[in-house]
Image: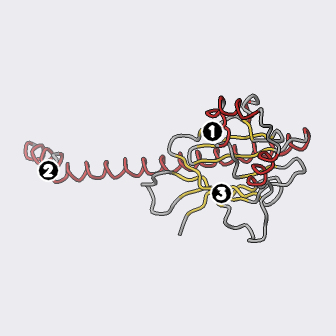
Amino acid sequence: MNHYSKKTTRRNGFTLIEVMLVIVLVGLMVSVIQFSASGDKAEETLEMSSKRFAGVFNIAAEYGMLNNIELGLMIDKTGYQYLGYDGEKWTDVSENELFSRYELPEGVELVLQLDDLPIEEPQLFDTELFNELQEDNKDPDDELSENRDSENNIEEKKLIPQIYILSGGEITPFSLRFQIVENDYTEAKLHFKVTGLYTTPLSVEGPLFDE
């Protein structure tokens, strides 16, 4: 009986190698869990961001048609902002909260593509033509006020959209990619793609992975 007890005690003990194996296995399990959680969260964030963009853009197009307003969209890596054309220049339309500047969630960036346009496709708005018309219509008496407001004018000139939304329903053809800034959990680049071809509604594709 005593012999059996001693033998049992020996079998219930753990060697250093066995303990180290358990630690390694636990570490691998935690890594797998973190991998899945990070991937799911990134995909969900990109999907929500791309669908939010497409939804607001479609509403903006409808708003422009109903109110006979020419709208534009100014995009950078971290967000986007809607603009309105008042007949002379592009202005901020942030009084409508839906069209105000929107910042993307942290870790998400935008890549705008307009290169797919045919070479012969003209811009819906020619900004150089706008500037020429403004120069021709200048009143000499306005020069003094322009000098006083030079800083404001500089800021206004920066408001130039890359995408135009015309009151007739036409839009600048474009492709907008929503992606993670630093993608460490996979070699492929996870992203969602929003595409607009001359009119709304926009299409949303994803999740997509670079080859």
Left or right, residue 129 beside residue 27: right
- The percent coordinates of residue 65 (x first, y second) are 90, 44
Front residue of this view, candidates 103 and 122: 122
The residue wearing badge 2 is 15
Left or right, residue 29 beside residue 168: left
The answer to whether residue 170 is above or below residue 160 is below
Question: As shown in the figure, which amino acid type bears the numbered disc 2?
Answer: Thr
Whether pointer 3 and pointer 2 mark residues with C-beta atoms closer than 8 Å, the reply is no
Left or right, residue 52 beside residue 68: left
Mark 3 and mark 2 lie on one chain; the one further toward the N terminus is 2
Badge 2 marks a residue whose secondary structure is loop
Residue at horizontal 61 percent and vertical 43 percent from the top = 79
The residue wearing badge 1 is 154
Marks counted in the figure total: 3
- The percent coordinates of residue 10 (x first, y second) are 12, 48
Mark 3, Cα crowd under 10 Å, few <14 / some 14-19 / many 20+, is many
Front residue of this view, candidates 175 and 26: 175
Badge 3 marks a residue whose secondary structure is strand
- Label 3, label 2: how far apart the Cα atoms are: 54 Å
Left or right, residue 171 beside residue 168: left
Residue at horizontal 73 percent and vertical 67 percent from the top = 117
- Label 1, label 3: how far apart the Cα atoms are: 33 Å
The residue wearing badge 3 is 193
